[in-house]
Amino acid sequence: MEVFNEINKLKIFYNSNHISQKTIGFVPTMGALHEGHISLVRKSKEENDITVCSIFVNPIQFNNKEDLKKYPRDLDSDLKMLEKEKCDIVFAPSVEEMYPEPDNTKYDFGHLDKILEGEFREGHFNGVAVVVKKLFDIVNPSKAYFGNKDYQQLTIVRQLVKMLKLDIEIVGCPIIREKDGLAMSSRNKLLTVEERNAASNIPKILFRAKELKHSIPIKILKHWIEDEINSVPLLKLEYFDIVNSETLLSISSFNKDEKNIACIAVYSGKIRLIDNIVF
Ligand code: AMP
């Protein structure tokens, strides 16, 4: 496994090993890797000659300084995990390497980045789009792998590729969950035992809501979710919505020809967690 911190060194390696003539699968991450990330690396390895994983905690996608400061980082453990998976190349740049000067690019995603997460994390998706585009330019992938865990991010990256007419296939991958159903997330590492126990109710409530979807109207279901989540000590609902899987627009009734996703953001103590399931 080759590890690079600098764009130039990565480029030299690409040239001397004729990497651009091979199919390159790319897995962008912010590190503190878990089985969710590893599932993307495995998928990329199945489908490409070369797999590149990036590890970069992108400051411009954090709308909250405290969140950026406490975001978990463990490069040694990440490299061990990637080595075990036989990942070919790791790109782990510094902030200065990625942003020698501020990048003020503004993308127009219409309503897509203003709803759900966008309503509570201003500028987050623009920051994601800026770093993803920069990484795509550096890594030059044929395919890039993203988790359905961050469903809105996946939708926005697809839109970015479409808008900029990039020749990259975006592959959405299933959510990997802990044994009790909690979606794996780097942020789970920040939970206290009590917060972790409380968080296990999030998927349980989501899956119960899915069972109830034909017996109660959506409006009532939304109140039900809110009451269920908020009745668990330490949990506080930020939002819950059921949306069309392509437009991400909120639906008011179910239509059997449409795929719907139920999206949720919940605080367990001070840690903000997101999840979604196909409804
Ligand atoms: P992150 O490091 O949180 O930015 O995530 C990097 C990539 O891994 C994103 O495409 C995420 O959607 C994906 N990912 C994170 N958690 C999971 C999970 N539990 N299952 C599948 N993919 C995930």
Image: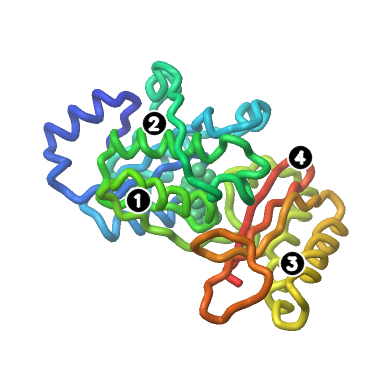
Frontmost of labels 2 and 3 is: 3
Residue in view at x 57 percent, y 35 percent:
123
Distance from Cα at disc 3 to Cα at disc 4: 20 Å
Question: Which comes before the other along the chain, label 3 or label 4?
Answer: 3
Residue 110's x, y, as percent?
51, 47
Going by the image, does 223 lie left or right of 22?
right
Q: Quadrant of the N terminus?
A: top left
Could you tell me the amino acid type at mark 4?
A: Lys
Looking at the rendered structure, which numbered label has been put on residue 92? 2
Q: Is mark 2 within 8 Å of ligand 1?
A: no
Neighbor class of circle 3 (other Cα within 10 Å; few <14, some 14-19, many 20+) is some
Check the image and report above or below for 173 versus 118.
below
For label 1, the residue is: 162
For label 4, the residue is: 270
Check disc 2 and report its element: helix, strand or loop: loop
Could you tell me the amino acid type at mark 3?
A: Ile
The answer to the question of whether label 1 and label 4 lie on touching residues, with beta carbons closer than 8 A, is: no
Check disc 3 and report its element: helix, strand or loop: helix
Q: Which residue occupies the foreground of this view, 149 or 239?
A: 239
Distance from Cα at disc 1 to Cα at disc 3: 35 Å
The answer to the question of whether label 2 and label 4 lie on touching residues, with beta carbons closer than 8 A, is: no
The answer to whether any part of residue 35 appears in the image is no
Question: Which comes before the other along the chain, label 2 or label 3?
Answer: 2
Residue in view at x 27 percent, y 45 percent:
141
For label 3, the residue is: 205
Check the image and report above or below for 119 versus 60.
below
Question: Which comes before the other along the chain, label 1 or label 4?
Answer: 1
Frontmost of labels 1 and 4 is: 1
Distance from Cα at disc 2 to Cα at disc 1: 27 Å
Residue 180's x, y, as percent?
67, 64
